[in-house]
Amino acid sequence: MPCQELVELVSDYLEGALSPVDRARFEAHIRECEGCTHYLEQMRLTIRLAGTLTAESMSQEARETLLRAFRDWRSA
Amino acid sequence: MIDIGEEARLVEALRRGDEQVFMALVDRYQASLLKVALVFLGNPSTAEEVVQEAWVGVLQGLTRFEGRSSLKTWIFGILMNVIRKRRDHDGRLPPTAAFDDDLGSGEAAVAPGRFGSTRHWSVPPASWAGLPEARLLSRETVAQVRAAITALPANQRAVITLRDVEGMSAIEACNVLSISETNQRVLLHRARSRVRQALEPYLTGE
């Protein structure tokens, strides 16, 4: 498997969507190829970093607005 | 996770107008909804507005909620509709377009120039394993990740936000966006590849 093919299969690999044959080819390539090992590691880290994005917590004002909206809705 | 019986009781209580149940639901999902809205709209106050609007949509839709999807999926679906109505950041996804209209299938995960004639690396990626946690979790890195995700086409941004930022399962993301699992995976692949590419010069430098 050429490296250029492997990089297009990384997500299917991580999602468990490769066929058993392709999965074996993928893993055999990774064992032999430092560049692709790094690539896979970079993708895993990218996913992890995306998970660190946070939102600011809800303001008290927003909570009160929602509560009012709920009461309006209830009385409508 | 909320089980189905609990969910039905919850919806019943909401329809009856139980304020505490509503606010508990708000507390459960607000942070996630804000996070998704923020990735799409970039601006915290606009994100908050859009989430408020989504909650109103939830209230208005309660009588129509049939429990065919989970409450969580349904709420996020309402948010996505509000976001799309509000504006499309890059103009590539008009409000009526489906999320899988343009999969970007022709895009390469890695620039072809990085490979030699045998399609093996000529400029291989460096290891990021040695990077200190402090660097990885620094504000600058987080800002880079956010900028990279914000720069994605709307449909790729939607998928990576729900999956990797919000931590939804593939099936949940498919339900929220009404796309097939295959298309979800294609979009996720394009999105992750682009974000990695955007981070590479930043994280590979000394």
Image (tube, coloured by chain):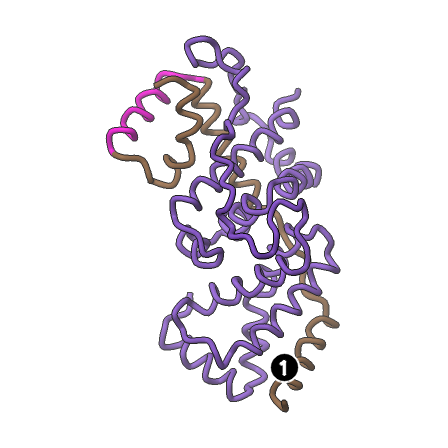
Chain colours: A brown, B purple
Q: Chain of mark 1?
A: A
- In percent of width and height, residue B42 lies at 70, 50
Which residue is the extreme one toward the bottom? A75
Taken as a whole, is the magenta stretch helix, strand or loop? helix
Quick one: B141 or B159, which is closer to the camera?
B159
Task: Say which quadrant the N terminus of chain B sits in.
Answer: bottom left
Task: Identify the residue shown where x is 51% and y is 78%.
Answer: B62
A4 above or below B196? above
Q: Is residue B17 magenta?
A: no
Instruction: Give the side of residue B30 with respect to residue B103, left or right.
Output: right
Relative height, residue A61 to residue B180 (above, below):
below
In this figure, which residue is indicated by the disc labeled 1?
A70
Q: Nearer the viewer, residue B38 or A53?
A: B38
**Depth order, front residue of A49/B129:** A49
Image point (61%, 31%), residue name: B199
Mark 1: give few (<14), some (14-19) or many (20+) Cα within 10 Å. Answer: many
Residue B136: quarter of image: top right
**Residue A43 at what x, y percent from top left?**
49, 32
Coordinates of residue A8 in the picture (x, y in percent): 43, 29
- Picture quadrant of residue A19: top left
Question: In the picture provided, is B92 more to the left or to the right than B108?
Answer: right
Residue located 57% across and 43% down the image: A50
Q: Which residues are magenta?
A: A20-34
Q: Secondary structure at mark 1?
A: helix
Q: Amino acid at mark 1?
A: Phe
